[in-house]
Image (cartoon, rainbow, N blue to C red):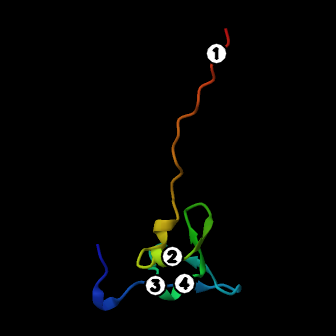
Amino acid sequence: MKRSRWKGVYVKPEQSKKPNTFSRVPRSSTIIPKFSGQTFKVHNGKSFREITITKEMLGYKFGEFSKTRSDFAFKKKKKKKK
């Protein structure tokens, strides 16, 4: 469900001690033009992942760039020796 237009976009970064770095940004926050070129830490459920914002990311949510699930792959079977 979309957020009401009159409310505006949801943005809530917490400033870090390092310049151009924010710590712990909610996954539901929207990326705005003010953030381009800066680095953010987004939690994926296990650890924080650093994300540097580019122009192509504007308008998306932070959670879209921090995968929460690992890729699945079948294990390779060893060939039997004869």
For mark 2, what is the residue? 26
SS type, badge 3:
loop
For mark 3, what is the residue? 32
The spot of residue 5 in percent (x, y) is: 29, 87
**Between disc 2 and disc 4, whose residue precedes?**
4
In the image, what residue occupies the spot 58% across and 82% down?
Answer: 37
**Between disc 1 and disc 2, whose residue precedes?**
2
SS type, badge 2:
loop
**Between disc 1 and disc 4, whose residue precedes?**
4
What distance separates the C-alpha of mark 1 from that of mark 3?
56 Å
Q: Amino acid at mark 1?
A: Lys
Q: Amino acid at mark 4?
A: Pro
On the rendered structure, is 19 left or right of 26?
right
For mark 1, what is the residue? 80
What distance separates the C-alpha of mark 4 from that of mark 3?
11 Å
Outermost residue toward the right in this view: 18
Q: Amino acid at mark 3?
A: Ile
Q: Confirm or deny contact between disc 4 and disc 3 (CB under 8 A).
A: no
In the image, what residue occupies the spot 29% across and 72% down?
Answer: 1
Tag shown at residue 39: none
In the depicted structure, whether residue 59 falls above or below residue 5: above
**Between disc 1 and disc 3, whose residue precedes?**
3
Mark nearest the camera among 1 and 2 is 1
In the depicted structure, whether residue 27 falls above or below residue 32: above
Q: Which quadrant would the C terminus be assigned to in this image?
A: top right
What distance separates the C-alpha of mark 2 from that of mark 4?
7 Å
Q: Confirm or deny contact between disc 1 and disc 2 (CB under 8 A).
A: no
For disc 3, the neighbor class at 10 Å (few under 14, some 14 to 19, many from 20) is some
For mark 4, what is the residue? 13
